[in-house]
Every structure is written in structure tokens, then in C-alpha cells.
Image (cartoon, rainbow, N blue to C red):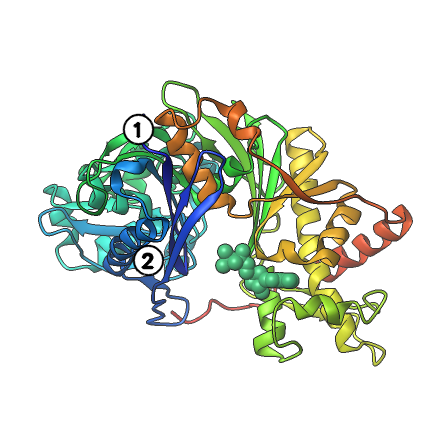
């Protein structure tokens, strides 16, 4: 190994970041670039994959320049990426044949409803629910709607990838996907870690266009161009990267990333835990030559975005952190509960026909109570997911590691510790997604020797311990659950395409 730094690329939903870490896992330089969000129709969300690639090409030299280092100082590069977003491009030109279809896009909802008869088999093979969230239905949509796409794909001219595949191909010319991303496509068998013939036939996908599935940690190739000569040595889906960056390496370790939405991942070791409670088994990571490590995931669609709604939709606050000040003007929620089922409910309910409610309104309720109820909504949604995890895994969570923008909120973090009856801890390094990508690549090239050395880099910045009266906790949880039932069944007809 030569080089004193690892470069992490965090290709997110709204922006891409290029971050340089040193051997103590300290952040040395960072550059960030937003890309455009395209909404061509209601429910459709697209990205320009070339724009994302060009942004990255601009940012990498800037990051190195900021740190005052050259390419020879880089030991390796790792990628973390928004998951499930689907890109198809022509290998002869390198140009996408359609804009990338983003994980939030719901255009394939009716098509999936029509395949409902296959849901059990798909679940058995992949662990996933038949939801628009995953890539397969979007890939099929592109093949069905872009002129000649299916013929070109069958002839071997078109390539499919999620975002890490697209970036790895552009950086190295190699067409591979990491196994964690592949586990979100709905085309990979979660036990054999291979593309599954039944699923390829069901979604009518030509196998020639699929990338080779590789471990998350392995040298995929040597970069050319902006990263000339640097080994590309790791890739993970962003939530898996956060789990890895939080050093949740043992079965029973869990983290929650609190951002726009929130994602709880529990390491379940070498076992695929099939969920009976609305969670998703997923691949957490795989080191080359070793068995995969699995996780159970609870995805919550709306948490930080509810705070944004209080700010932008209602004008109750002017910045996100102000919600804590406003919520602190009252001692409790005043009997009010907000269930933010803005896009239906994800884990553990998976109710696409649900819509949001504010329950328990009386003239006693003030904006302070609304602010508190909005924060509590994030807490209760976490509690529902953790309850499901404990039930599925038979383990009882002892400590929850947290990261993401909402963890700056002390009132919320204390509330979460209280209602989970669990200690909540936040590390000094909050950039866990990028750190996970850096760790993946760094382990491969020998920049860090082993998992133990990564664990030693984890330093606690804050801790919250539970102190709530159990009777109050149970009563509040019962009220929340009752409020959730009020969201069900609101959408009574399919929404127009
Ligand atoms: P993402 O990576 O999903 O863009 P971030 O981790 O950057 O999200 O967190 C941003 C989200 O956190 C926003 O939705 C914002 O409303 C919320 N947020 C930021 N600061 C606070 C705060 N102090 N209290 C509550 N929510 C916050």
C-alpha cells in the first residue's frame, strides 16, 4: 500500500460528495455538488446520470487540491450510493438511453399491482416486498418504453446498473455491482447472491445487460482519468455504508440514520432473517473470500421531511433546528399526534393507501404541541421498527447508534432513548456513509489492517439514557398506535397515472 489517504465518494439522492479521510478516520477535505431533480409527471423522479458523473469528475481534483495532495497520495477509493436508482446506458457511446429513474419514483405502481400473484415467490427469493422502491420494475419500464431498448439489450449493447455500477464503469471500464446494491434490485437471490432466472423471466430482463455481482470489498479495477492509477476497492449502498461506518460488525449491533427519511439496520450475522413483521432482510456487506453478513432493515419514509414541512409548508419555524426551541415551549404533546403518512407508510406497515393525519386536535393545542408531536412522530416510527426487529430476530436491542442531520436535536434523541428504553449514542464522526465507503476500500488495500482497527476509530460524542416513566410510555405508545390506524384506507381509488 502506498498513499496516506482514502477517497470516499458518497453519491446521494440530492448531491454527490467527495471526501478524503486519513488513517485516523479524520475528514481532511470535502467537496459537495447538488444535481438536478427532475419531476416530469406527478410521482416520477429522475436524475441525469451524466450530470452526476461530470460533477464527480469536477469535484475529485478540487478535493485533492483542497488537501494539497496528488493522486500518488491516494491508497484507494470507495463508493457509497443512493440505492435502487436505475440507469441503463449504451456501452458503445457511454450515454444513458433514458434518465436514471430514482428510488422514490412510483410510475410502476400499477404494473406491480398486476404482478401481485408473484409476491410470495419474489419475497421468498429476494426478501423484498413488491414495491416500486426496488429496481426491477423500473428496469422493465425502461426496456418496455425506450424505442429498441429491448433489442439492443438482447444484442448486448445496453448495460444496466445502480449508481455505483455506473460510476465504477466510468472510472474503470469494468461492469460490476456490489452485492449490497444487487440485493435491492429484486433480481438477485438473497441466499445464492446470484441473478435469479425466475426473476429475470418475471421482469423480462436480458441477462446480457446485468453487471457481475461482486463482494462489497474487493479491487474492482484500476481507475483511469481523474483518478488515474488509483485502485477502486469497495462499494456499498448508502445505508449499508452507514452501518459499516458505525462499525456495527457484530450480530445484534444496530444503527439508525436520521435524515429526510430514516433507516434502521440491524446486523443479523451470517443469517438471512425472514421478517414476519414488515422488515426487509438485506445484505449488509461482504468481504472478498468471506461469507456475506446480513441485516434486517426498517425503512421509514418521512422523518426529517416532516420537520421541513413544518418549516416550508406551514411556516411554523424558519430553520430545522428551531423545532427544538418551539417544542421546548411546552411540556408534552397536549394530546396531539402527527402520523406523517405523506407517501403511505413504509416499515413495518407497508400501507400505500394511507395518508397523513393530525389526531387528537382540541383548541388547547398550540404550535409548540405540534412541534413536539412532529418530533415524537420520528421517535414512535423508530419504536415500531425496533419492536419489529426484536420480534423477528429474537434479540433485544441494547444500544442504538445514530447519525444524520436530526441527531443534532437533543430533545428528540432523549425522547427516542426514553421510548425505546435503550441507550442512544452518536459518534464524533457523523459522516458515517462516506466513512463506511472509505473503510470498505481501506480494508482491501491494507490502509486499515482489520475490523478491530476500525472499531478503535469510533469515538462517542453524545449519549442519551432512558428515564421515562414506563406507565406514561405505554400510554403514549397506545395513543400513537391508535392514531396510525386513522391513516389507513384514505386513498380509495388508484391515483391517475
Ligand atoms: P439527508 O442525508 O437525507 O439529506 P441529513 O442527514 O442531511 O439528510 O438531514 C437533514 C434532515 O434533518 C432534514 O430533513 C431536516 O429537516 C432535518 N433536521 C436537520 N436539523 C434538525 C434538527 N436540529 N432537528 C430536527 N430535524 C433536523
Task: Choose the circle earlier in sequence order: 1 or 2.
Answer: 1
Relative placement, left or right, of 21 versus 69 is right
Nearer to the camera, 430 or 15: 430
Nearer to the camera, 160 or 234: 234
How far across and down, in percent of the image, does residue 207 sit? 21, 37
Crowding around mark 2 (Cα neighbors within 10 Å: few <14, some 14 to 19, many 20+) is many
* Residue for badge 1: 2
User: On the rendered image, what quadrant is the C terminus found in?
Assistant: bottom left
Q: Which mark is residue 75?
A: none
* Helix, strand or loop under label 1: loop
Q: Which mark is residue 101?
A: 2
Q: Is residue 128 visible?
A: no
What residue sits 43% from the left and 20% below the top?
291
Q: Total marks drawn? A: 2
Depth check, mark 1 against mark 2: the one in front is 1
How far across and down, in percent of the image, does residue 315 sit? 62, 80
Q: CA distance from mark 1 to mark 2?
A: 38 Å
Q: Quadrant of residue 374?
A: bottom right
User: On the rendered image, what quadrant is the N terminus found in?
Assistant: top left
* Helix, strand or loop under label 2: strand
Relative placement, left or right, of 127 versus 385 is left
How far across and down, in percent of the image, does residue 76 sit? 32, 35
What residue sits 79% from the left and 67% below the top?
328
Query: Where on the image, by quarter, is ligand 1?
Result: bottom right
Nearer to the camera, 261 or 388: 261
Query: Which residue of the protein is positioned furthest toward the front in this rendering?
Result: 68
Q: Is residue 18 above or below residue 352?
A: above
Q: Quadrant of residue 98?
A: bottom left
Q: Is residue 241 above or below residue 50?
A: above
Amino acid at each position: 500500500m502506498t498513499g496516506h489517504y482514502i477517497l470516499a465518494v458518497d453519491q446521494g439522492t440530492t448531491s454527490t460528495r467527495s471526501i478524503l479521510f486519513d488513517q485516523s478516520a479524520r475528514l481532511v477535505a470535502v467537496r459537495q455538488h447538488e444535481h438536478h431533480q427532475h419531476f416530469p409527471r406527478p410521482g416520477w423522479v429522475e436524475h441525469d446520470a451524466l450530470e452526476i458523473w461530470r460533477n464527480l469528475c469536477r469535484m475529485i481534483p478540487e478535493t485533492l487540491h483542497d488537501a494539497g495532495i496528488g493522486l500518488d497520495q491516494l491508497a484507494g477509493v470507495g463508493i457509497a450510493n443512493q440505492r435502487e436508482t436505475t440507469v441503463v446506458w449504451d456501452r458503445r457511446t457511454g450515454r444513458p438511453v433514458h434518465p436514471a429513474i430514482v428510488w422514490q419514483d412510483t410510475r410502476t405502481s400499477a404494473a406491480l399491482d398486476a404482478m401481485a400473484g408473484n409476491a410470495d415467490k419474489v419475497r421468498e427469493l429476494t426478501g423484498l416486498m413488491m414495491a416500486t422502491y426496488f429496481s426491477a420494475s423500473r428496469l422493465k419500464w425502461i426496456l418496455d418504453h425506450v424505442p429498441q431498448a429491448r433489442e439492443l439489450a438482447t444484442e448486448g449493447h445496453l448495460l444496466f446498473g445502480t449508481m455505483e455500477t455506473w460510476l465504477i464503469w466510468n472510472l474503470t471500464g469494468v461492469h460490476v455491482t456490489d452485492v449490497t446494491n444487487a440485493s435491492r434490485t429484486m433480481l438477485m437471490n438473497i441466499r445464492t447472491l446470484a441473478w435469479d432466472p425466475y426473476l429475470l423471466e418475471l421482469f423480462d430482463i436480458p441477462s446480457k445487460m446485468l453487471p457481475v455481482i461482486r463482494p462489497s470489498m474487493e479491487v474492482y479495477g484500476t481507475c483511469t482519468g481523474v483518478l488515474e492509477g488509483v485502485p477502486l476497492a469497495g462499494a456499498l449502498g448508502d445505508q449499508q455504508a452507514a452501518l459499516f461506518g458505525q462499525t456495527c460488525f457484530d450480530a445484534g449491533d444496530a444503527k439508525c440514520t436520521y435524515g429526510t427519511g430514516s433507516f434502521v439496520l440491524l446486523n443479523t450475522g451470517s443469517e438471512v432473517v425472514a421478517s414476519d413483521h414488515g422488515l426487509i432482510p438485506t445484505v449488509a456487506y461482504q468481504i472478498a473470500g468471506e461469507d456475506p453478513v446480513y441485516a434486517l432493515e426498517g425503512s421509514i419514509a418521512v422523518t426529517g421531511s416532516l420537520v421541513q414541512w413544518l418549516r416550508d409548508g406551514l411556516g411554523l419555524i424558519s430553520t430545522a433546528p428551531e423545532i427544538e426551541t418551539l417544542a421546548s415551549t411546552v411540556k408534552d404533546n397536549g394530546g396531539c399526534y402527527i402520523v406523517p403518512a405523506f407517501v403511505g407508510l413504509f416499515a413495518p406497515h407497508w400501507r400505500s393507501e394511507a395518508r397523513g393525519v393530525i389526531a387528537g386536535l382540541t383548541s388547547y393545542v398550540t404550535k409548540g404541541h405540534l412541534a413536539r408531536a412532529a418530533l415524537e412522530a420520528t421517535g414512535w416510527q423508530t419504536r415500531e421498527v425496533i419492536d419489529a426487529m426484536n420480534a423477528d430476530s429474537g434479540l433485544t436491542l441494547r444500544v442504538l447508534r445514530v447519525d444524520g442531520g436530526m441527531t443534532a436535536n437533543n430533545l428528540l434523541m432523549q425522547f427516542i432513548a426514553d421510548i425505546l428504553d435503550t441507550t442512544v449514542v452518536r459518534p464524533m464522526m457523523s459522516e458515517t456513509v462516506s466513512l463506511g465507503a472509505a473503510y470498505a476500500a481501506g480494508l482491501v488495500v491494507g490502509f486499515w489492517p482489520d475490523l478491530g482497527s476500525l472499531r478503535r476509530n469510533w469515538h462517542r460524542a453524545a449519549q442519551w439514557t432512558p428515564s421515562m416513566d414506563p406507565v406514561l410510555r405505554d400510554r403514549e405508545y397506545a395513543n400513537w398506535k391508535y392514531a396510525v390506524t386513522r391513516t389507513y384506507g384514505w386513498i380509495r381509488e388508484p391515483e391517475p397515472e
